[in-house]
């Protein structure tokens, strides 16, 4: 199992909108996660539950314009954030719960949790 993590726009317009005149082709798949083509330059990446990393994976791609001209290969590095209450174990590219007495207040690429401030505590992991 896994979960859709996010949409990758490999070559969008400066305003953040997808460029529907271009087509992206993956020339080397990432070593983790799976990609599903959504059209144009858009792919959706599915990662196993609990995965995370900065970087998590990389992929190689090319882009074709409306005249059929193909770009040289480009490389996209993918970061998967861990949810709040967890941190990244980068060697394994996994998310782990913060230990008791530590916290992580937001989704992040932190490799360690923060110590609870004086007078505060966590009663359980995560």
Image (tube, helix red, strand yellow):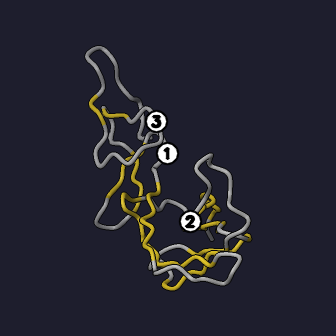
- In the rendered structure, find residue 57 and report the number of the disc placed on it: none
Task: Write down the residue under mark 3.
Answer: 106
Q: Which residue is drawn at 56% across and 81% down?
A: 26
Q: How far apart are marks 3 and 2 (CA)?
A: 26 Å
- Identify the residue shown where x is 45% and y is 74%: 74
Which of the labelled discs sits on residue 83, or is there none? 1
Across and down, in percent, residue 5 comes to 60, 58
Residue 9 picture location, percent across and down? 60, 61
Q: In which quarter of the image is the N terminus?
A: bottom right
Q: Nearer the viewer, residue 112 or 66?
A: 66
Indicate which label's residue lies in the foreground, 2 or 1.
2
Q: Is residue 108 above or below residue 80?
A: above
Q: Which of marks 2 and 1 is nearer the N terminus?
A: 2
Q: Relative to the observer, which residue lies in front, 69 or 25?
A: 69
Q: Name the mark nearer the viewer: 3 or 2.
A: 2
Would you place residue 41 above or below residue 27 in this image?
A: above
Give the residue number, with chain letter if any, for mark 2.
10
Q: Looking at the image, which residue is at 39% across and 53% down?
A: 96
The mark nearer the N terminus, 1 or 3, is 1
């Amino acid at each position: 199992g896994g979960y859709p993590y996010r949409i990758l726009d490999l070559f969008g317009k400066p305003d953040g909108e997808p460029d529907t005149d271009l087509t992206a082709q993956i020339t080397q798949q990432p070593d983790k996660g799976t990609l599903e083509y959504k059209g144009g330059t858009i792919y959706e990446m599915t990662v196993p539950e609990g995965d995370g990393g900065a970087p998590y994976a990389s992929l190689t791609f090319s882009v074709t314009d409306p005249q059929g001209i193909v770009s040289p290969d480009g490389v996209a590095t993918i970061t998967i954030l861990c949810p709040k209450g967890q941190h990244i174990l980068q060697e394994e590219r996994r998310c782990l719960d913060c230990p008791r007495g530590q916290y992580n207040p937001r989704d992040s690429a932190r490799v360690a949790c923060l110590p609870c401030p004086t007078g505060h505590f966590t009663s359980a992991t995560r």
